[in-house]
Amino acid sequence: MAKGAGAELKPSQPFESLEAEAFLALLRTAERLQERAAEILKPHGLSPTQYNALRILRGAGTPGLACREIGERMIHHDPDITRLLDRLEGRGLVARSRSREDRRVMKTRITAAGLARLQALDRPAEEFERRLLGRLGQDRLRILIRLLEAVRGAPG
């Protein structure tokens, strides 16, 4: 380096901190899992977001849920849940109707066709999860779950 050209360069370090490395590893892992999940869902004509909404509605049972409640439970918060539900309704996978308790509220329920679509995916999804995570073993999976819950619960 020429005299007076500035401070001497330090050897490059891949990350500023262990936290930065862990953060990037989480993001990369989440992205990879999303890509692989999308591959499983594509032949069934669903996006990961649509699949998530259908699973939420299956879990809600017969009473169904209001749009706001679905949005609160989504993994990825879609700013336009109404449009997502419109597409699912147009394909016959969900049905919407006015709430009896409050006519201003539209309740969304999964249809028999939506249930059938999810049932066709239950085994492939289970195999996918087992293939990716099963090799960690039960104890390490429990630790991973607790660690991820701690990260989600940390102040932002």
Image: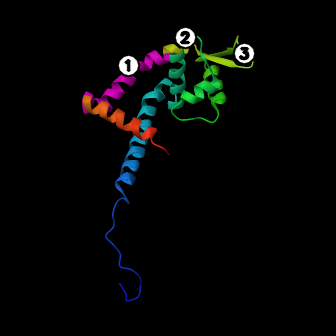
Q: Which element carries disc 2, helix, strand or loop?
A: helix
Q: Residues within 10 Å of mark 1 (few under 14, many from 20)?
A: few
Task: Kindly identify which numbered label has been placed on residue 47.
Answer: none
Residue linked to disc 1? 123
- 3D distance between C-alphas at marks 3 and 1: 38 Å
* Mark 2 or 3, closer to the camera: 3
Identify which amino acid the numbered label 2 is placed on: Ala
Identify which amino acid the numbered label 3 is placed on: Asp
Q: Which element carries disc 3, helix, strand or loop?
A: loop
Q: Is residue 75 above or below residue 7?
A: above
> Mark 2 or 3 closer to N-term?
3
Q: Which element carries disc 1, helix, strand or loop?
A: helix
Give the x, y percent position of residue 20.
39, 53
* Mark 3 or 1, closer to the camera: 3
Q: Quadrant of the N terminus?
A: bottom left
Residue 13 position by quadrant: bottom left
Region in magenta:
117-138
Q: Are marks 2 and 1 in contact (CB under 8 Å)?
A: no
Q: Residues within 10 Å of mark 3 (few under 14, many from 20)?
A: few
Q: Is residue 60 left or right of residue 137?
A: right
Q: Is residue 5 above or below residue 106?
A: below
- 3D distance between C-alphas at marks 2 and 1: 18 Å
Residue linked to disc 3? 102
Identify which amino acid the numbered label 1 is placed on: Arg
Q: Is residue 125 magenta?
A: yes
Give the x, y percent position of residue 58.
51, 16
Residue linked to disc 2? 112
Give the x, y percent position of residue 66.
64, 21
Magenta: main secondary structure equals helix
Residue at image point 60% right, 25% down:
69
Q: Is residue 81 magenta?
A: no
